[in-house]
Image (cartoon, coloured by chain):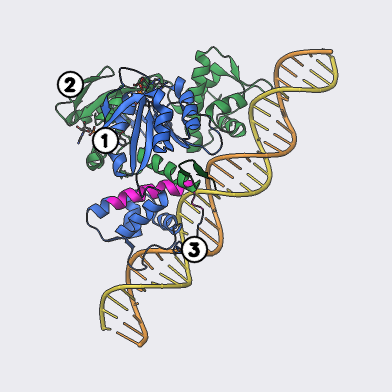
Chain colours: A green, B blue, C yellow, D orange
Amino acid sequence: MSESREPRARVIPEATVARLAVYLRVLTGLADAGRASVSSGELASAAGVNPAGLRKDLSYLGPCGVRGVGYAVPALRERLARALGVEQSRSCVLVGMGNLGSALAGYAGFGTRGFSFVGLLDADPARVGDVVGGTAVRPVDDLEQVVAEHGVTIAVVTTPAPVAQSVCDRLVDAGVRSIVNFAPVALQVPAGVDVRQVDLSVELQVLAFLDQQKGVQVVGEQVVLP
Amino acid sequence: MSESREPRARVIPEATVARLAVYLRVLTGLADAGRASVSSGELASAAGVNPAGLRKDLSYLGPCGVRGVGYAVPALRERLARALGVEQSRSCVLVGMGNLGSALAGYAGFGTRGFSFVGLLDADPARVGDVVGGTAVRPVDDLEQVVAEHGVTIAVVTTPAPVAQSVCDRLVDAGVRSIVNFAPVALQVPAGVDVRQVDLSVELQVLAFLDQQKGVQVVGEQVVLP
DNA sequence: CGGACTTTGTTCCTGCGTTCACAAGCGGTT
DNA sequence: AACCGCTTGTGAACGCAGGAACAAAGTCCG
Ligand SMILES: NC(=O)c1ccc[n+]([C@@H]2O[C@H](COP(=O)([O-])OP(=O)(O)OC[C@H]3O[C@@H](n4cnc5c(N)ncnc54)[C@H](O)[C@@H]3O)[C@@H](O)[C@H]2O)c1
Ligand SMILES: NC(=O)c1ccc[n+]([C@@H]2O[C@H](COP(=O)([O-])OP(=O)(O)OC[C@H]3O[C@@H](n4cnc5c(N)ncnc54)[C@H](O)[C@@H]3O)[C@@H](O)[C@H]2O)c1
């Protein structure tokens, strides 16, 4: 045991992990701005969370701040990146290069956060060969080959809903263990595979519900509040 | 009190609301397929949730099934749509018609779920005039006018991060109360305004964390399991 | 060198969400 | 008409996340 630096391997709740990713983004911005240290209050404000909650989140990684001073920006940034497993870039594939898939594949923000798309796949021959974000689109038949070549474990699904499950099955068979799914269907996967469902319509409908619960009525100039 | 049909106005947890939206989507598919009734088990399976939890979710709307039989698909669908406030179409605006904004604006799935974009706004003169999904892109200066014209209360922000807060401020001032934000910044809004943050990088980073927690090591042909 | 101030790390507690399990009710059947 | 099986709806318990308050610790200043 050469590295007994890590204080304890406490289990980190998934909700905390999601927030850690937000903190990491904010810290990167601060580091780029040349900031050396930051307090929990300032970080929490920038991340949109409670300061006490933020300190609790960070405490899962063990003590990493200096009392009376705050947190060292570069050190904390590196520590978060290691905890999240994005120290070195991770390879991903994206299946379904339509409108949404193309937008995601061309987005520079993923690369700066430690993810690179090594495979862009589509079933439409007309799409194959297009270059998006520096990578050429390949036929979906190459799926297994691309996954094996790069040891890919993360995939993004942006196909039409009816074929999403079959695409998912192929990905899992090929060895993918983590999937972000944008198609509006609940993917069925074996144990050990994680799916994160991103459903934009649901976001809008939740807002619509909250709106109507506010008793919002703007009729002409008459505003009725609850 | 002419309508005392509603049994009670219990408060519905936000997590439940998000699931109700999923049930509504599944029910719409079942209705299109001509199904007359469905059991909680089947619905739960299609939605990817626990059957008991689904029944509890639905019970917030009051009893709406038939014991020994299940739920009537069209009736439940209508009831959910009313509860979520998407009975009639709701008007939205979208600010930032770049790659992501264009994909969203051209997506037909929003229209079928009760949302229509009555305003597409961008600061780039080169984008203004483009027609996406049947609506022409207008200059961002028209923001206040469009919101007022249609009584818009819901907005989608897909601008670059640095300008998202200022766009948000203008939206709130114009009367918008609900915002879906794709820019990777925590928007500051006054009380009474809801923001739903959609951060795709966070989704990937959560998966990356789960991946490394599995102890995934695929080195050559050697697979190490926890 | 000492004291006071600042900020972290932790503990407790409250409330929510989820799950399990059972009673209640309806339809079909004999 | 009564019984039986199936499914809903609800009550209770468990676990978890979030928030507030407090103690520990390090720095800065006098
Ligand atoms: N565009 C949006 O804003 C948006 C919003 C919410 C959800 N979605 C969902 O995201 C998915 C994609 O949306 P889109 O607007 O990009 O649709 P799209 O039709 O533009 O793109 C779908 C792409 O998938 C490809 N495809 C079809 N079958 C395939 C297969 N078997 N294997 C590989 N590729 C295949 C098609 O060739 C096409 O390029 C849909 O499920 C949609 O419901 C999209
Ligand atoms: N594209 C993706 O897949 C993706 C993924 C995650 C997050 N995001 C985020 O979504 C946002 C948009 O991403 P994108 O890839 O579409 O970027 P983009 O540069 O293609 O589009 C941004 C658009 O916003 C417009 N704009 C700039 N300033 C504006 C202003 N003040 N008012 C109105 N419009 C203005 C620009 O003219 C441009 O059309 C960014 O914040 C990005 O970080 C995008």
Span colored in magenta: B11-28
Gap between marks 2 and 1, in whole Å?
21 Å
Gap between marks 3 and 1, in whole Å?
56 Å
Confirm whether the magenta stretch covers residue A158: no
The residue tagged 1 is A171
Crowd around label 2: few <14 · some 14–19 · many ≥20 (10 Å): some
Gap between marks 3 and 2, in whole Å?
65 Å
Rendered view: A38 above or below B81 = above
- B161, B156: nearer the viewer: B156
Q: Are marks 3 and 1 on the same chain?
A: no
Residue that appears at 34% across and 50% down: B24
Tag 1: amino acid:
Leu
Give the tally of numbered discs. Answer: 3
The answer to whether residue B153 is seen in the rendering is: yes
The residue tagged 3 is B1
The residue tagged 2 is A129
Crowd around label 3: few <14 · some 14–19 · many ≥20 (10 Å): few
Instruction: State the mark number for residue A211.
Output: none
Tag 3: amino acid:
Met
Q: Earlier in the sequence, mark 2 or mark 1?
A: 2
- C28, A82: nearer the viewer: C28
- Give the number of the mark in front: 3 or 2: 3
